[in-house]
Image (cartoon, grey):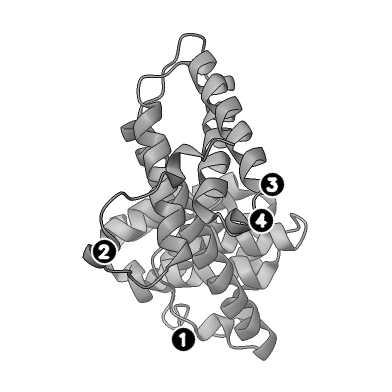
């Protein structure tokens, strides 16, 4: 019986070898790294052939009691299977590029981390909402995506208090909206009704003393209703207020 290639014996004298602590995760990483190095420049057919060889090795290892815990072999097989699927979905004549694969993997990891951050922040804001303190919470960078997540969880329904929160924060320059660049970016990330609501609130705050962030949100519910049903009209009204203020200066 042939010993799988990655398990070929170390021929150095036993006394010259130092046995490190066994780390299955590290062994698996080594196996995946070796596969990616071997696969560099391979096309779909070559990867498919290498995958078949890895499956043969796995069948051989499964018949040996001393290889039951072959972590590296399983990791290599799984990596060949992943690369086989990767190239099968790629354009014809594509060859495997480990650098491009690593960059794509890093991007996927970043997306997963961002999704986890959004989910955790959405849980936090939902709890504050249930406590009735959402309107007092200062927004952070990226909360526009969190607002979208809360809406998604609600099945796409507009939640008036959730939308009023960023609108008031944007109008009053709260939290990270103190930064003009953050406010400009938010205008492209928030929905038109929220942006129109914020613009209308900002103009009311300038024209009517006491109509800013310190006023009870319920007193300005009309602005939210107008922005939700007629965002263009709300934006036009805010622009009109701006012109009126300019003529009074």
Q: Are marks 2 and 3 in contact (CB under 8 Å)?
A: no
62 relative position to 114: left or right: right
**Sequence-first tag of 1 and 3:** 3
Report the Cα–Cα distance between label 2 and label 3. Answer: 28 Å
Tell which of 88 and 59 is nearer to you.
Answer: 59
Q: Which residue is mark 3?
A: 63
**Sequence-first tag of 1 and 4:** 1
**Sequence-first tag of 4 and 2:** 2
Residue 211 percent location from the top left of the image: 48, 78
Q: Between tags 1 and 3, which lies in front? A: 3
Identify which residue is drawn at 62% across, 32% down. Answer: 56
Image height of 162 relative to 46, above or below = below
Q: Which residue is mark 1?
A: 214
Q: Residues within 10 Å of mark 1 (few under 14, many from 20)?
A: few
Secondary structure under the numbered disc 4 in the rendered image: helix
Residue 230 percent location from the top left of the image: 65, 49
Q: Which residue is mark 2?
A: 17
Q: Which residue is mark 4?
A: 228
């Amino acid at each position: 019986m042939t010993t799988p290639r990655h398990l070929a014996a170390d021929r150095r004298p036993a006394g010259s070898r130092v046995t490190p602590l066994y780390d299955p995760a590290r062994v698996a990483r080594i196996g995946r790294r070796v596969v990616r190095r071997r696969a560099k420049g391979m096309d779909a057919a070559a990867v498919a052939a290498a995958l078949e060889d890895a499956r043969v090795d796995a069948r051989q290892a499964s018949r040996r009691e001393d290889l039951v815990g072959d972590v590296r072999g399983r990791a290599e097989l799984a990596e060949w299977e992943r690369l086989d699927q990767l190239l099968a979905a790629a354009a014809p004549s594509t060859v495997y590029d480990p650098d491009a694969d690593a960059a794509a993997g890093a991007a996927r990891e970043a997306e997963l981390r961002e999704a986890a951050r959004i989910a955790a922040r959405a849980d936090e804001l939902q709890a504050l909402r249930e406590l009735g303190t959402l309107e007092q919470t200062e927004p952070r960078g990226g909360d526009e995506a969190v607002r979208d997540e809360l809406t998604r969880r609600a099945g796409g329904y507009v939640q008036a208090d959730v939308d009023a929160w960023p609108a008031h924060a944007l109008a009053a320059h709260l939290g990270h909206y103190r930064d003009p660049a953050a406010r400009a970016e938010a205008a492209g990330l928030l929905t038109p009704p929220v942006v129109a609501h914020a613009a209308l609130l900002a103009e009311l705050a300038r024209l009517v003393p006491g109509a800013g962030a310190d006023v009870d949100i319920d007193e300005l519910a009309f602005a939210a209703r107008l922005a939700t049903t007629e965002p263009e009209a709300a934006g036009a009204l805010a622009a009109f207020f701006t012109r009126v203020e300019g003529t009074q200066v």
